[in-house]
Amino acid sequence: MNFRIMTAAGLAIALAGCTTIPSAGNPIEARWVGKSAGVFFAAYGPPISDSEQGSTTIYTWRGGYKTVRIPAKYAEGADGKRGKQIASARTAYLRCQAEITTNSDYTIRDIRTVADIPGVNGPSYCAEFLAPEQK
């Protein structure tokens, strides 16, 4: 009897560690997991491919194409003047690719960036494009 109770308690503890709540560290998951894939595709365009795996479907999406000119960066000079140039101006071609896993009811279960590059304002253009900060 004690063995059964301890086994059931161990199983309950193990299952309590399993969760589908998105982590706070990933703004894309926090924004889209639990929402309808239809809303995502309506906002950002259709997927380029899909594959079914049991009751889930994995969509490959690509988009967010944008060309931006990033200005040169300069060191802080004396008396608030512009100092020596530390980075030259450049043109960046921004884009994003993600894999979106949905349930049978078309709800996003997982969204994972596959191809991402540094954005204009941070380390991830996909995060800037797919989960912009609310103002």
Image (cartoon, grey):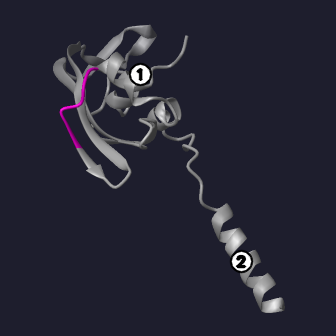
Question: Residue at point 38% right, 16% down?
Answer: 77
Q: Residue 13: where, in percent of width, then height?
A: 71, 69
Q: Residue 131: where, in percent of width, then height?
A: 44, 25
Question: Residue at point 17% right, 23% down?
Answer: 93
Total tally of numbered discs in the picture: 2
Label 1 crowding class (10 Å Cα cut-off): few <14, some 14-19, many 20+?
few
- Does residue 48 belong to the magenta stretch? yes
Give amino acid for label 1: Val
Q: Residue furthest right?
A: 2
Secondary structure beneath label 1 = helix
Disc nearer the start of the sequence (2/1): 2
Location of residue 43 by image quarter: top left
Q: Residue under circle 1?
A: 39
From this view, report whether residue 54 is shown above or below residue 87: below
Question: Residue at point 48% right, 39% down?
Answer: 26
Label 2 crowding class (10 Å Cα cut-off): few <14, some 14-19, many 20+?
few
Tell me whether the residue at label 2 lies in contact with that at label 1, contact meaning CB atoms closer than 8 angstroms. Answer: no
Residue in front for this viewpoint, 116 or 31: 31
Give amino acid for label 2: Gly
State the quadrant of the C terminus: top right
Secondary structure beneath label 2 = helix
In the picture, measured across the screen, residue 47 lies left or right of residue 8, that is: left
Q: Is residue 34 visible?
A: yes
Q: Is residue 74 visible?
A: no
Q: Residue under circle 2?
A: 10
- Does residue 31 belong to the magenta stretch? no
Distance from disc 2 to disc 1, alpha carbons, whole Å, reads 40 Å
Q: Residue 115: where, in percent of width, then height?
A: 24, 39
Report the span colored magenta: 45-50
